């Protein structure tokens, strides 16, 4: 009993000393301090309690920062004393946390008393870092601190020394490493140690490390000053003017230059102010002056700034930049192409196109294995971020056709079309990407890639025309539905280049066949015009026969020519629409080209063509000029085409209309 | 792109404080000395001034210290102190600029009303974005 009581007294003494010594600024803790000590002495506290749980507390503690007033002072005190006190000899492994699987926190992300985003106050304590429950290497570790920082300008604190020896990262050290490669935390260590060892000897705070080589005797004298402004001690360590801060490696190259220039300017200003070049004392005083004017400058420590930069750089890490940052990558590629093209033409100086070097991370496979206990039946049903569990068994029941109203059917059909468009679009994006993948891939993989690509193109076409693999495409309905939707039209325009000639011609036909309907539907969107370009490209590959039938479709004549109606509504609609008219002109122009070029003409085709031509010209003549749409472009050979079929008078009329 | 922050963050180091211009999501423009920033783009602005622009005129309302939550920041840029005075814009008093702003808002609302009215007469309507169910 005596022993226990004695132990208690010692504990209380140590506690009170500790609390006072600690210079705690947190008012909440200070309040707690006043109330806590009496409590400790009351009630027979078994010292063994402390011994046992001290292990637990010791590593719980470091996860908390001073901002957690809920931490009881006793716990806090326990943290402070033991590591530096008796337990130094203790084995580090004893401090290790229990294995993750048996910890009370199962399946959830590592417990953090402080949110991940908290900036560091001080350098971190390495021992505790190693004990964090953190299986994933790219986790941003919560910086930890043990106590409030010692006054500025001190020698490198034991914390920092420990850091170096443990080879751990602290925000201040991180920035010195250029670029993040791979697992940033592990691969940096050799570099750090090399870099740091040289600095360790210098009796200055860690900030000086940023400025490269250890400066000559001036710093020790500077540290004796304790300027009142927060963070202004940094200014005393004004770097060598020529020194280029190595931590700016994360900056965009253009900005680095700007910053350098500005530093130069500042330096020049200082020089002119003080009259003596390179006078360090002069620098310092002028800085202090400026700081007096603006006492809030550099409220953020360099360490904090670098910490934020570090996070930002880590956010830029990407396993697949083409997936995450598609537009950025493409934009820069285009720029490079343009500059390369420029270089080819002129032999001007090579323009520097410097890019921000973003860290690249190798893809890490995280196979999450749910927690399993030996000897238990089945698995735990704990759900967490890493392991989401199905809570409700929702079964999809399809309704019977009879129940639905007409409206619903229409709506569902439309939705089906939308889904088809989305699926086809994904295929399209993949197909467009194959070129790039091809270039990046190995020789052996390439045939497989080509096969995939071909297959996808076929799938796309099937999607467009409707899945039914009948002898003939039974209906255009599916296609027309797609074409009624803005996105569908744009998609077709993008798909056309990938299709074979037949498939493309098929699409063209379907469009021409249903053109008036599509025109009507397109009234609001006016997107049909985007199809002109790919259509014209396709046209130039088509033989005359196809062109003729295309024209037929446009004019909506059945195979066997009947007595032409006085007014052909189909064609009229076509003529009155910009897209329709442009398409018609293109078709006519192409036909004319083919006629002129090919020597032997089949009679039948000639007849057909002639008939169609006369039909078209008749329509063109009939339609009042006001109703005629304005085409995108008028091909030049149209006039010569018409001249063959109509007399001079009508030709003149046509000419005016074409204008 | 996040590297914008690293620019300003590192620029904080220079002795002369730099003014920054922040554009918020609600359209406000704040100008002040950026004292602190974090990875969410939460900002601490010192001696902030809210600048209202109407046409070629602008007016400043002094606001003191601002702490801005990062999600509301659209962009943040540094103001070149030398070029700051070199602007075609004319500074006016607060009352004047607020009056100008009110007038501008009113005019905009009226023109919008007229437009909708005209379309209604023709039997058309500009579809609101939320009623469109297709892309």
Image (cartoon, rainbow, N blue to C red):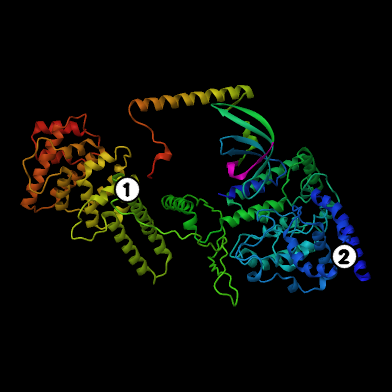
For disc 2, the marked residue is A44
**Any mark on residue A140, and which?**
none
**N-term-proximal mark, 2 vs 1:** 2
Q: Is residue A173 above or below residue A258?
A: below
Q: Is residue A618 above or below residue B88?
A: below
Toward the front, the furthest residue is A403
Query: For the magenta stretch, what is the residue range?
Result: B65-76
Q: Is residue B80 visible?
A: yes
For disc 1, the marked residue is A414
Classify the position of the C terminus of chain B by image quarter. top left
The secondary structure that dominates the magenta segment is strand
Q: What is the crowding at mark 1: few (fewer than 14 residues within 10 Å), some, or many (at least 20)?
A: some
Q: CA distance from mark 2 to mark 1?
A: 77 Å
Percent coordinates x, y for residue B15 in the rendering: 73, 43
Q: Nearer the viewer, residue A271 or A617?
A: A617
Percent coordinates x, y for residue A349 in the rendering: 50, 50
Q: Nearer the viewer, residue A603 or A489?
A: A489
Image position of B53 (left or right of A567): right
Instruction: Please name the residue shown 53% across and 62% down the image.
Output: A388
């Amino acid at each position: 009993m005596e022993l226990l009581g004695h132990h208690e007294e010692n504990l209380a003494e140590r506690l009170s000393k500790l609390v006072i010594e600690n210079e705690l600024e947190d008012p909440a803790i200070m309040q707690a301090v006043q109330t806590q000590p009496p409590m400790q002495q009351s009630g027979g506290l078994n010292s063994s309690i402390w011994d046992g749980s001290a292990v637990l507390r010791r590593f719980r503690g470091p996860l908390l920062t001073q901002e957690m007033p809920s931490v009881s002072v006793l716990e806090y005190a326990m943290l402070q004393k033991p590591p530096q006190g008796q337990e130094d000899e203790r084995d580090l492994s004893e401090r290790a946390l229990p294995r993750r699987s048996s910890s009370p926190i199962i399946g959830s992300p590592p417990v953090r008393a402080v949110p991940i985003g908290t900036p560091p106050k001080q350098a971190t304590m390495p021992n505790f870092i190693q004990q964090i429950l953190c299986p994933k290497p790219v986790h941003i570790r919560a910086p930890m601190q043990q106590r409030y920082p010692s006054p500025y300008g001190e020698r490198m604190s034991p914390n920092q020394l420990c850091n170096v020896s443990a080879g751990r990262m602290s925000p201040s050290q991180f920035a010195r490493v250029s670029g993040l490669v791979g697992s940033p935390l592990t691969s940096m260590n050799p570099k750090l140690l090399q870099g740091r060892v040289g600095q360790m000897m210098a009796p200055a705070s860690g900030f000086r490390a940023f400025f490269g080589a250890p400066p000559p005797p001036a710093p020790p004298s500077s540290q004796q000053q304790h300027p009142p402004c927060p963070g202004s001690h940094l200014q005393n360590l004004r770097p060598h003017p020529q020194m280029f801060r190595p931590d700016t490696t994360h900056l965009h190259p253009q900005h680095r230059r700007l910053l350098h220039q500005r530093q130069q300017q500042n330096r020049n200003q200082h020089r002119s102010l003080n009259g003596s070049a390179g006078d360090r004392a002069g620098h310092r005083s002028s800085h202090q002056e400026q700081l007096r004017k603006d006492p809030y400058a550099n409220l953020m420590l360099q360490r904090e700034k670098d910490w934020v930069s570090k996070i930002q750089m880590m956010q830029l890490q990407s396993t697949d930049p083409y997936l995450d940052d598609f537009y950025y990558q493409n934009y820069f590629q285009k720029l490079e192409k343009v500059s390369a093209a420029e270089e080819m033409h002129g032999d001007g100086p090579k323009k520097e196109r410097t890019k921000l070097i973003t860290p690249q991370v190798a893809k890490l496979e995280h196979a999450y294995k749910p927690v399993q206990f030996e000897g238990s039946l089945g698995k735990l049903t704990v759900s967490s971020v890493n392991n989401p569990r199905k809570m409700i068994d929702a079964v999809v029941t399809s309704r019977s056709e009879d129940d639905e109203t007409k409206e619903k059917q229409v709506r569902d059909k439309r939705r089906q079309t939308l889904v088809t468009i989305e699926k086809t679009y994904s295929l399209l994006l993949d197909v467009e990407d194959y070129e790039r993948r091809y270039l990046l891939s190995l020789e052996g993989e390439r045939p497989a890639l080509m096969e995939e690509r071909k297959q996808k193109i076929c799938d796309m076409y099937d999607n467009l025309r409707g899945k039914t693999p009948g002898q003939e495409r039974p209906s255009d309905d599916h296609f027309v539905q797609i074409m009624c939707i803005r996105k569908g039209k744009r998609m077709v325009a993008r798909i056309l280049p990938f299709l074979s000639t037949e498939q493309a011609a098929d699409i063209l036909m379907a469009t021409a066949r249903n053109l008036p309907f599509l025109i009507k539907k397109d009234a609001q969107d006016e997107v049909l015009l985007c199809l002109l370009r790919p259509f014209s490209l396709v046209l130039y590959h088509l033989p005359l026969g196809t062109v003729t039938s295309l024209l037929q479709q446009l004019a909506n004549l059945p195979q066997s020519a009947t007595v032409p109606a006085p007014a052909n509504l189909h064609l009229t609609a076509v003529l009155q629409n910009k897209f329709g008219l442009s398409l018609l002109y293109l078709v006519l122009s192409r036909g004319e080209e083919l006629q002129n070029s090919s020597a032997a003409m089949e009679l039948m085709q000639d007849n057909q063509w002639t008939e169609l031509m006369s039909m078209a010209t008749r329509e063109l003549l009939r339609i009042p000029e006001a109703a005629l749409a304005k085409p995108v472009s008028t091909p030049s050979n149209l006039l010569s085409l018409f001249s063959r079929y109509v007399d001079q008078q009508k030709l003149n009329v046509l000419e005016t209309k074409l204008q | 792109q996040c590297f914008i922050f690293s620019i300003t963050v590192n620029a904080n180091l220079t002795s002369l404080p730099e003014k920054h211009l922040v554009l918020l999501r609600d359209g406000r423009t704040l100008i002040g000395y950026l004292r602190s920033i974090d990875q969410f783009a939460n900002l601490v602005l010192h001696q902030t001034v809210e600048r209202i622009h109407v046409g070629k005129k602008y007016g400043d309302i002094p606001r003191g210290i601002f702490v801005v939550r990062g999600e509301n920041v659209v962009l943040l840029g540094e103001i070149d102190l030398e070029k700051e005075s070199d602007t075609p814009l004319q500074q006016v008093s607060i009352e004047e600029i607020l009056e100008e702003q009110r007038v501008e808002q009113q005019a905009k609302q009226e023109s919008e009303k007229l437009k909708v009215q005209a379309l209604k007469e023709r039997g058309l309507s500009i579809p609101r974005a939320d009623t469109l169910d297709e892309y």
